[in-house]
Amino acid sequence: MNTPSNRIGWIVSPVFFRDRTGFALAFALAMMCAPFDIASAAEVSGVRVDPRARVAGVELALNGAGLRRLFLANVYVIGLYMPERTNSADTAIEATGPKRIALTFLRDVTAQALVDALYEGIRDSSTETEFTRLKTAAEALSAVMLPLRTAKAGDVVALDYLPGAGSQVVMNGRAVGQPIPGHDLYRALLRIWLGEPPVDNNLKRLLLGRN
């Protein structure tokens, strides 16, 4: 497993993942997340966070949400949706029911940057053996992402887990491409934020409702 500082590119900003200079500062700034109260908050950094989502015909509850920043710039708001709220990272990662990771972008990001950063994020959230098994699925997911061309400020890119089907990309409520089969890919994605160690301990707490 790589350390959080190695994984900062995907989690903080897909545009900057190749720029390894200044990562110590980037990591320190990225540790700052907007406070989120699951019981009362309706928005994070001006972004309305839906309290519920429907995936595979199942109503999911918002488990937690937070803001990611880089060099004092807001990058995206992330929300995690589960059938039942949990404060256990293992439960969230291993559960085989429907799930959603929703990214609301606060700046424009090209599809190529998303693809490159997503691929690196999956690699860096996995062991070498795990990534060898995941490589084909990661490449398939990248191929699905490329037709998006650009995620503009305000766009919502969701990564859904559909039981029996796999990982589905959804942009602004519209499914993109076909689901990528299997559960391992989605587990690797969740480990980026919820693994041990996570890329950001504070954001992990927010996504798990532990604030």
Image (cartoon, rainbow, N blue to C red):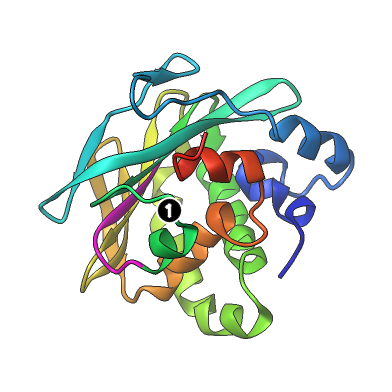
Can residue 103 be seen here? The reply is no
Residue in view at x 46 percent, y 64 percent: 90
Residue extending furthest toward the left: 57
Q: Nearer the viewer, residue 151 or 158?
A: 158
Q: Nearer the viewer, residue 59 or 90?
A: 90
Region of the chain picked out in magenta, as a range: 95-102
- Confirm whether the magenta stretch covers residue 135: no
State which quarter of the image contains the N terminus. bottom right
| Label 1 crowd bin: few (<14), some (14–19), many (20+), radius 10 Å | many
Position in image of residue 174 (x %, y %) = 23, 43
Position in image of residue 49 (x %, y %) = 35, 26
Element on which disc 1 rests: helix
- Confirm whether the magenta stretch covers residue 97: yes
Position in image of residue 100 (x %, y %) = 33, 50
Residue under label 1, please give it. 145
Looking at the image, residue 124 sits to the left or right of residue 181; the answer is right
Q: Image quadrant of residue 161?
A: bottom left
Q: Amino acid at mark 1?
A: Met
Looking at the image, residue 156 sits to the left or right of residue 23; the answer is left
Residue in view at x 81 percent, y 44 percent: 19
Vertically, is 102 above or below 194? above
Q: Image quadrant of residue 141?
A: bottom left
Position in image of residue 173 (x %, y %) = 24, 38
Vertically, is 129 above or below 73? below
Residue in view at x 76 percent, y 30 percent: 29
Q: How many marks?
A: 1
Can residue 185 be seen here? The reply is yes
